[in-house]
Image: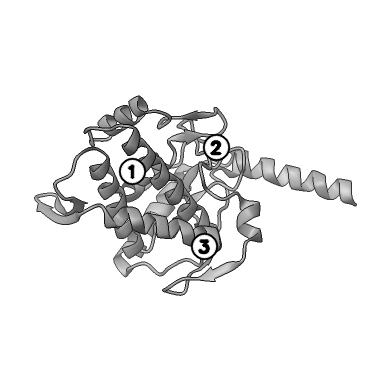
Amino acid sequence: MREKIPDGLALVAAFANTVDVEAGTDELADVDGLRRWLAAHGHDGPAGDAELAHVRDFRAALRDEIAAHHDQPATTPHRETATRHAEAASRHEAATQPGDGKASQPAAHHDGAAPAAQRDGAAPATQPGGDVRTGEQAGARARLNAHARGVPVRVALDLGGVRLEAAGASGVESLLGALLAELLLAERDGVWRRLKICDAETCREAFYDWSKNSSRRWCSMGVCGNRSKTRAYRVRRRES
C-alpha cells in the first residue's frame, strides 16, 4: 500500500509520479495523455504539442529538484506545522506495519532526474539561502524559475480558507500554478524537503519521508530498501 502523501503535496507527488520506471509507462507520453491527466485533476483546458513539451520539461526539472532533497539538511518548520507533522507522523507510524509492500500507484521514472551516482559525483554549487546543490540541481531550479515567471499566481479567499491559485488560467497554466503554489506553501511550512525520489534506480518514485530525522532514501524499506541493501551486501561479499 502506498504511504500517504500529505494533502498539501498530493498534486506535486501525483504529477512527479506520472512516469513508471518499472512498467516503462508514462501518463504524459502524448497529447491525449496530457489532456486526460489535466481533466482528471481539475485543470481541463487546451493542450497541444507545445504544452506537452512545456509540461514534460517542468516535470523533469521538478523531479531533479525533489531528487536533491536527499542531500539537503532539514529545514525548521513553523511551530504549528511541526506539531501537525509530528502528530501525523505518529499516526502514520502506528498504522504502518513492517514489510509493507510498495505503492500500487505509478512509480516514478527519472525522466530527467539525476541518478544517485551522478548526484553523488557532481561538484557542489552554493545557492542563495545556504543550500548546497550540484550543478545539475542548480540548473533544475533555474528551469523551475523560468517556468514560474510565466505563471501568474494570486491569493484567493473563500469559506474554506486562503489559498494560492493560477490567475485567470486554464489547462497547463492552471496546473503549473497549482503545483508552484503547493511547492511554495510546503517550503514555507518546512516540509518541502521531505518529498523525495526513491534512491532505487529501478523505482525512482516520489514519496514523502515521514521519519523523524528525514533520513529515508527509499519509498519502501520492505521492497526497495531491502533490495538495495541485499545488492550492497553481495558486492561486499564478492570483494572480500
Q: Nearer the viewer, mark 1 or mark 2?
A: 1
Note whether residue 4 is visible.
no
**Is disc 1 placed on a helix, strand or loop?**
helix
Crowd around label 2: few <14 · some 14–19 · many ≥20 (10 Å): some
Residue 37, picture quadrant: top left
Q: Name the residue carrying label 3.
A: 213
**Residue 7, image x and y in percent?**
31, 46
Q: Name the residue carrying label 2.
A: 100
**Is disc 2 placed on a helix, strand or loop?**
loop
Tell me: residue 190, above or below residue 223: below
**Is disc 3 placed on a helix, strand or loop?**
loop
Q: Nearer the viewer, residue 126 or 76?
A: 126
**Residue 81, image x and y in percent?**
32, 62
Residue 156, picture quadrant: bottom left
For badge 2, the amino acid type reads: Asp
Tell me: residue 122, above or below residue 24: below
- Left or right for 158, reference 198: left
Tell me: residue 146, above or below residue 174: below
Q: Nearer the viewer, residue 103 or 29?
A: 29
Q: Of marks 3 and 2, which one's residue comes earlier in the chain?
A: 2
For badge 1, the amino acid type reads: Leu
For badge 3, the amino acid type reads: Asn
Q: Of marks 1 and 3, which one's residue comes earlier in the chain?
A: 1
Q: Name the residue carrying label 1.
A: 11
Q: Nearer the viewer, residue 51 or 206?
A: 51
For this orientation, the residue located farthest to the front is 50
Tell me: residue 67, above or below residue 4: below
Crowd around label 3: few <14 · some 14–19 · many ≥20 (10 Å): few
